[in-house]
Amino acid sequence: MFRTCLTSGSRLVFSSPSSSSFFHTSSTNLSHASKRMSARTKKKNIARTAERAKQADVDKPSVVLGTRPNEESEKWANCKLAKILVTEESLAASTEMNSRDFSIGKVELPKEFGFGVTEKEAEVLFEDLPIASQHMTTQVSQYAQDAPGKISPVPKKQMPTHGMVTEEAEREVMKANFLAKALDLRNANAAGIAFENRRRIIQAFSSPENSFDSGRTEVQVALLTYKIRNLWKHLLTFRRDVGNRRGLRDLIHQRAKHLKYLKKSHRARYDALLDELALDPSSVEGELVV
C-alpha cells in the first residue's frame, strides 16, 4: 500500500508543469540564437566599415600626382603648369613652320625654339645679325682689293632695305633658315626639352617685380611638381627601378614643406598655387605616406 502511494506520488511530481519546465531547453536556445544574431550583425558592420574604407581609398587624392583618380585628366589638363609645359608628343604631332618676313627676306621659323631662345633673341638672330653679316660680306668684297685689313663699318641707314635681292641677301636668307632649323625644339633631346620647360616654369611663376625669380616659393613648388610627375612616369615604365623611389619620396616631402611654409605666410598665394598646379589640399597636408 505504501509502495503504491509512493509510486503514484512520484508520477505526479514528475508530471507537474513546474518540474517539466525545470528540465526544458528553450531558454538555452534563445541565448544561443541571440548570440548568433549579434555575431552576424557584428560581421555585417565590419564588412560595411571595410567597404567604406575601401571607397575612401579609391576617392582619396594621390599623394604623388595631387589629384583624385576621376579628376586627373581634366584637372591636370586645365591647370597653368600643364599648359606651359612642352612634351615630346606635342612636338612630334606637327611639322609645320611659321613663315615670317624680315629685312633680308622670308624665313621659316619653328613654332617652338630651343636653347632658351625667346622672341627678343629671335629678333636679334634673324633681323639684326643677317643684316650685319650681309654688310660685312659686302664691305669685305668691296674693300678687300683696295685696302685689305682697313675696312670701315657702314652706317645702318646705308644697309639694303627690304625687297633688294642680291647674292649676299639670298645667302643670308639661306643661312637664317638653316639656323632656324638648328634652333627648332623638335631637334632637342630630353635634356633640351627639360631645360626649356624649367625656363618656362621660372618665367611663368616668378613675381611681377622679378621676371626670373628662381628662388620664389611658387617657382620651387612648380619645379618640384614637374620633377615629381616626370619621375612618376619613369617609375610606371620601369617598375623595378627601386633606387628612384626614395628620390620620389624626398621630392614629395620637400614640396610639402614648401607648401606648408607658404600656407602659414601667404594663405591667398597658397590657395592660388594649388589651383595652378592641380593639387588637392588633402594630398599635400598632414602626414604623407608614399
Image (cartoon, grey):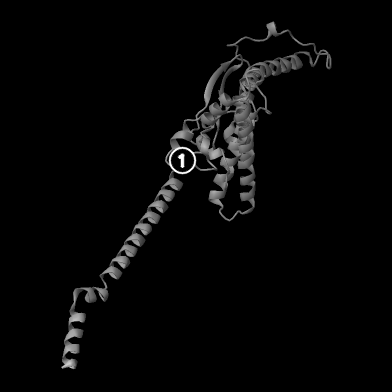
From the viewer's side, name the closer residue of 229 and 122.
Answer: 229
Image check: 98 left or right of 104?
left
Residue at the spot 70% in from the left edge and 18% down from the top edge: 133
- The x and y percentages for residue 235 are 57, 49
Q: Is residue 11 above or below residue 109?
A: below
SS assignment at label 1: loop
Residue 178 visible, this orientation: no
Q: Quadrant of the N terminus?
A: bottom left
Residue 136 vs residue 125, the one in the foreground: 125
In the rendered image, the vertical position of residue 127 relative to residue 226, given as above or below: above
- Identify residue type, mark 1: Arg
The residue shown at (68%, 6%) is: 157
Crowdedness of circle 1 by 10 Å Cα count: few (<14), some, many (20+)?
Answer: some
Q: From where the camera sits, is residue 282 visible?
A: yes
Q: Quadrant of residue 35?
A: bottom left
Residue at 40% x, 49% y: name it. Answer: 52
Q: Nearer the viewer, residue 110 or 45?
A: 45
Figure disc tally = 1
Q: Which residue is mark 1?
A: 68
List x then y, in percent, for residue 48.
38, 52
Q: Quadrant of residue 212?
A: top right
- Of all residues, the one furthest to the top in this rendering is 157
Q: Is residue 256 left or right of residue 13?
A: right
Percent across and percent down for residue 168 are 66, 18
Residue at 62% of width from left, 29% of height from top?
A: 264
